[in-house]
Amino acid sequence: MAIICGVPDDDGISDFLKCAITQNIGGTEVTVMAYMTEECRLSLNSVWESPFDGDSVGNAGIADKFSNIAQVKTGATSKTQLNSHKVWEGMEPPEASLTLTLHAYTNAQLEVDDPIQYLLQMASPDLREETPVGVDGSLGRVPGEAMFNVGRKFIMPMVISNVTYNLNAPKTPQNNYAYNTVTLTVSPKTMINKSEVPNKFL
């Protein structure tokens, strides 16, 4: 049976302002629903380098010393504009920083505490205690992907690399959190091609 926890569906707030995070945990599909804040950002980065930065006509051994001396004396250089040219080295997967809030309405355990616990599980591996391979051939598992639906605007399976929340947030008389703010750093495992952008960024 699937588990849905976090903020409720009948709170009168649009799903466009919510983030749904789903992953299979222990054979059960778990979905965490949380409110999005203004601090939900996504970045897309290319890696550009200048491989010719240190090259010049006279940078081979002792000739480099004479080239530097000549530059000091005359102000002339053997470097060219080509030395500053950047070369594309690759594309990093997009990275999102999501600041989400959870509020207790009727059940603080289900609406705040459980979601935080599930998010921590989603970000964690499942390793064996001593030997990497069990007698039955079983292996440890790395953290799995979770399906993120960010305000129905960005939908993609991603891995969670960081979970941060407030340990000293206000609590109920039952010692559950009355509300809390959770910050996630997430990214897909691979970069996104130009042709995929229209389908990934709705």
Image (spheres, rainbow, N blue to C red):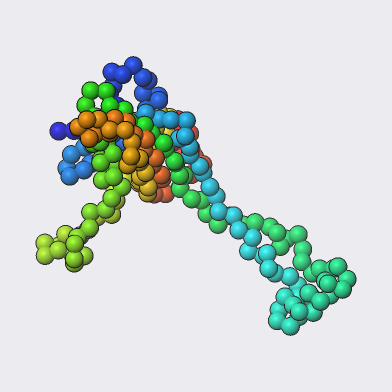
Quarter holding the N terminus is top left
> Taking 40 as reference, is 107 above or below it?
above
Instruction: Name the residue nearer the viewer: 96 or 81.
Output: 96
Q: Position of residue 57 (x, y in %)?
A: 76, 72
Q: Residue at x 70, y 59 (%)?
A: 84
Q: To which quarter of the image does residue 151 belong?
A: top left
> Taking 68 as reference, is 187 above or below it?
above
Name of the residue lying farthest toward the right = 74
Q: Residue at x 26, y 53 (%)?
A: 125
Quarter holding the C terminus is top left
Name of the residue lying farthest toward the front = 173
Name of the residue lying farthest toward the top = 12
Q: Residue at x 25, y 40 (%)?
A: 118
Q: Position of residue 34 (x, y in %)?
A: 33, 30
Q: To which quarter of the image does residue 130 belong?
A: bottom left
Instruction: Name the residue nearer the viewer: 114 or 51.
Output: 114
Name of the residue lying farthest toward the bottom = 62
Q: Is residue 11 left or right of residue 87?
A: left
Residue 5 seen in the figure: no
Q: Is residue 103 left or right of residue 109?
A: right
Q: How many discs appear?
A: 0
Q: Is residue 72 left or right of residue 53?
A: right
Q: Position of residue 7 (x, y in %)?
A: 29, 27
Instruction: Name the residue nearer the viewer: 180 or 136.
Output: 180
Q: To which quarter of the image does residue 36 belong?
A: top left
Residue 27 seen in the figure: yes
